[in-house]
Amino acid sequence: MMDFWSLFVENTFGGFYVSILALAAIFLVILMMGGVSIYTALWFCGIFLFVMCLGNGAWIIVLPISILIIFILIRGMTAFFESYSRI
């Protein structure tokens, strides 16, 4: 009997990380074809990769993505506060 893990991960892509990257690429193509901005599509794929690697314990991938998320969050908050103070 063949389960979903054997069919999708082992037989189709050959490994866990390769299947994660393939799913992220498929998501990116679907989102871009659906008219979503590239910035939003890349955020979605980045968070998807972050969560999948976090669940598997790959800290070498999670650490740079989490630093990038925190950096962009702080940059966005400072831009919001600066635009609010100019009013």
Image (cartoon, rainbow, N blue to C red):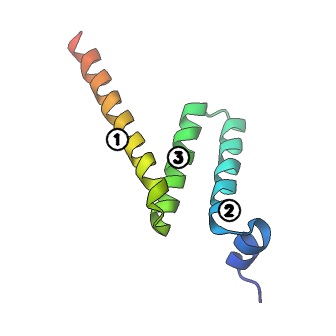
At numbered mark 1, what does the secondary structure look like: helix, strand or loop? Answer: helix
Marks 2/3: CA–CA distance = 15 Å
What number of labels is visible?
3
Marks 2/1 in contact by CB < 8 Å: the verdict is no
Amino acid type indicated by mark 2: Ser
Horizontal and vertical percent position of residue 47: 49, 49
**The N terminus is located in which quarter?**
bottom right
Mark 2 neighbour density, 10 Å: few (under 14) some (14–19) many (20 or more): some
Residue that protrudes farthest toward the bottom in the picture: 1
At numbered mark 3, what does the secondary structure look like: helix, strand or loop? Answer: helix
Give the numbered dot on residue 22: none
Is 50 situated above or below 40? below
Amino acid type indicated by mark 3: Gly
| Snapshot quadrant of residue 70 | top left
Determine the residue positioned at 70% across, 76% down.
Answer: 4
Horizontal and vertical percent position of residue 17: 62, 62
Marks 3/1: CA–CA distance = 13 Å
> Viewer-proximal residue, 15 or 7?
15
Residue at the spot of label 3: 46
Amino acid type indicated by mark 1: Ile
Q: Is residue 45 left or right of residue 64?
A: right
Determine the residue positioned at 68% across, 48% down.
Answer: 25
Residue at the spot of label 2: 19
Residue at the spot of label 1: 70
Is 56 situated above or below 29? below
> Viewer-proximal residue, 60 or 29?
60
Horizontal and vertical percent position of residue 43: 51, 41
Mark 3 neighbour density, 10 Å: few (under 14) some (14–19) many (20 or more): some
Is 12 situated above or below 46? below
Mark 1 neighbour density, 10 Å: few (under 14) some (14–19) many (20 or more): few
Residue that protrudes farthest toward the front in the picture: 60
